[in-house]
Image (spheres, rainbow, N blue to C red):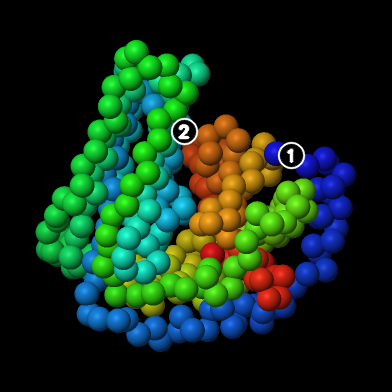
Amino acid sequence: MKLKASIIIGILFTITSCSQKKNESVDMEITSHYENYKYLNDSRPGYYLQVNNQNCYYEIQTNELVSGSYFLEFPSYSVRLPLNMQILTSGDQKLSIKVFPFKGDTLTNKANIDITLIYYPDITDLENDFGGSTILWKWEMPKSENLKLPYFELDTVFKADVPYEINVLDDYAEDLSKMDREDLLKEVLTEFIKKRENIINKNESKSYLISHIKRSSIQIYATNEEDEDLADGMISISKGKEAQPLENFNLKLLYDNKVVTLVNSENKMPAIFFINPETGARSWQPYYIFKNKKTGTWHMW
């Protein structure tokens, strides 16, 4: 989905009057309760997916939040995906796996993907391999030699037990599916343009970023020092790299239509990205936002 150049230019002019200090003050109600967060117990478990794929693309969501996707040019890929940041509370977790053709319009018998759900009892115990691992579930996509499928989809659930409860989206986030699609796109694009410009001009407030990182750091049990390091990395992501145009993107709704982002229409990667002109190395800046149903303001998820 694209906007006409005149609309984008208009948005660029209007956002210059918005200050980040105003956004910070609005965010305080949402972010302040993450400070000095008290866990429900002393456990520090972690959940991961080991994904091996050949001759296919895929997208995996946990609780309708993206856990991982692959739409790059290589025919095979292997990765271990952390799930904690998509697990908001203990209980049943929804897992959705979609597999797409690597080439052509249908899956072939060369397409293969196998997925293993792994549990670690303590992901803060780096010296002892997170306390050992337990395989909770294994799955391999069945062959479709005779079925000319445009994609394959599996929806399932697994149980997780975590020492935290993240209720921000339930408490604050608006159902974005009720908004007019064009109006939603304009508002989201405004936020993405501001985010991109702040990164390029190094106007990101470290304290503002850390206040938002606190939500995710609770889910992975990060220390204050690790939060500081992550914020520094987010601020300097464009160092030595050239910002790429914000174009050729699609609007993507997640988590019961409460979270939204923009992704590249070709490789499904984050719409904000940078390229090192010497090495060609790319850096992506994922950016997920939600709209406060009480104030109408946008907030980083």
Front-most of 175 and 184?
Answer: 175
Q: Which mark is residue 147?
A: none
Left/right of residue 53 with respect to residue 20 in the rendered view: left
Indicate the amino acid at tag 2: Phe
Name the spot of residue 39 as percent of width and height, x first.
32, 81
Badge 1 amino acid: Lys
Residue 182 sits above or below residue 153 on the image: below
Crowd around label 2: few <14 · some 14–19 · many ≥20 (10 Å): some
Q: Is residue 74 above or below residue 291?
A: above
Dot 1 falls on a residue whose secondary structure is: loop
Q: In screen coordinates, is 103 left or right of 120? A: right
Which image quarter is the C terminus in?
bottom right
Looking at the picture, how far across and down is residue 283, in whole percent? 51, 46
Residue 222 at least partly seen: no
Residue 267 picture location, percent across and down = 53, 34
Rendered-image quadrant of the N terminus: top right
Looking at the image, which residue is at 49% across and 16% down?
A: 104
Helix, strand or loop at label 2? It is: loop
Say how many tags the image has: 2
Q: Is residue 39 placed above or below 268 in the rendered structure? A: below
Give residue 184's quadrant in the image. Answer: bottom right
Q: CA distance from mark 1 to mark 2?
A: 20 Å
Residue 144 percent coordinates (x, y)? 33, 20
In this rendering, does residue 254 appear at all?
yes
Give the mark nearest the N terminus, 1 or 2.
1
In the image, which disc is placed on residue 2? 1
Residue shown at the point (46%, 80%) measured from the top left: 34
Residue occupied by mark 2: 71
Q: Residue at x 51, y 57 (%)?
A: 255
Residue positioned 56% across, 41% down in the render: 275
